[in-house]
Image (cartoon, rainbow, N blue to C red):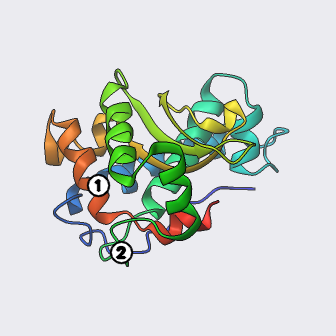
């Protein structure tokens, strides 16, 4: 199966000022498109060609296929979790209950999550996932890493590669991470549980 560039559920300028149109055009339109093209070329005619992104990320050995599949999956989750006008600035329902149970409060969760993103040396991702027992966990993954590789179910992520924020925030990664909370669509995250 050939993978395609995920379609954004919003206009390329809709997330401003948190994410500029220029960043969306480069990050989504160029970086993610390159990962999609690379992945399709790498798996064409091979045993992974018929697998889903999740299956490829879970089983591919470290290397080009894993790196490109991981980046496609991670970026798809990242871009689809945002909205220019989310219904709520905080999660509700089961997700809110789990965050309060496992992190004490939404504010504490946000602090821990941003700390994971800021603390990721170099390029990578901050993740909220759920383990097999239903406990929420925050992890940080380098490069194309995804919690699937640790038998966790990823729910939510912030991209801490410089291409995700450098045009808008330069070296101020923490500022960008803190601003992203304003555009998270918690209904999308809840649907991933």
Q: Nearer the viewer, residue 116 or 19?
A: 116
Q: Could you tell me which secondary element the residue under label 1 belongs to?
A: helix
What residue is pinned by disc 2?
86
Disc 2 residue crowd, few under 14, some 14–19, many 20+, Cα 10 Å = some
**Do the residues under discs 2 and 1 have CB atoms within 8 angstroms?**
no
Give the residue drawn at x 75%, y 56%: 1
Residue 98, position in %: x, y? 56, 54
Distance Cα–Cα, label 2 vs label 1:
12 Å
**Number of marks in picture:** 2
Is 77 situated left or right of 153 in this image?
Answer: left
Quarter occupied by residue 148 = top right
Q: Earlier in the sequence, mark 2 or mark 1?
A: 2
Q: Is residue 37 visible?
A: no
Residue 95, position in %: x, y? 54, 61
Give the residue drawn at x 42%, y 68%: 185
Q: Nearer the viewer, residue 39 or 23?
A: 23
Disc 1 residue crowd, few under 14, some 14–19, many 20+, Cα 10 Å = some
Is 91 situated left or right of 62 in this image?
Answer: left
Give the residue drawn at x 60%, y 68%: 191
Give the residue drawn at x 54%, y 60%: 97
Residue 137, position in %: x, y? 55, 39
Q: Nearer the viewer, residue 118 or 169?
A: 118
Q: Is residue 143 above or below residue 137?
A: above
What residue is pinned by disc 1?
180
Q: Can residue 22 be seen in this view?
A: yes
Q: Could you tell me which secondary element the residue under label 2 belongs to?
A: loop
Residue 180, position in %: x, y? 29, 55
Q: In this view, does 175 lie above or below 142?
A: below
């Amino acid at each position: 199966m050939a993978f395609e560039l995920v379609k954004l559920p919003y206009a390329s300028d809709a997330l401003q000022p948190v994410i500029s149109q220029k960043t969306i055009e480069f990050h989504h339109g160029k970086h993610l498109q390159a990962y999609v093209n690379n992945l399709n070329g790498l798996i064409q005619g091979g045993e992974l060609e018929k697998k889903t992104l999740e299956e490829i990320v879970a089983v591919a050995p470290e290397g080009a296929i894993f790196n490109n599949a991981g980046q496609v999956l991670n970026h798809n989750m990242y871009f689809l979790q945002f909205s220019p006008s989310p219904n709520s600035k905080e999660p509700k329902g089961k997700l809110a209950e789990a965050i309060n149970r496992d992190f004490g409060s939404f504010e504490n969760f946000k602090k821990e999550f941003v700390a994971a993103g800021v603390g990721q040396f170099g390029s990578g991702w901050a993740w909220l996932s759920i383990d097999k027992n239903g406990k929420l966990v925050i992890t940080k993954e380098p490069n194309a890493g995804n919690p699937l590789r640790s038998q966790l179910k990823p729910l939510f992520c912030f991209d801490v590669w410089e291409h995700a924020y450098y045009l808008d925030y330069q070296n101020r990664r923490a500022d960008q991470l803190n601003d992203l909370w304003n555009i998270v669509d918690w209904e999308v995250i809840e649907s991933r549980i």
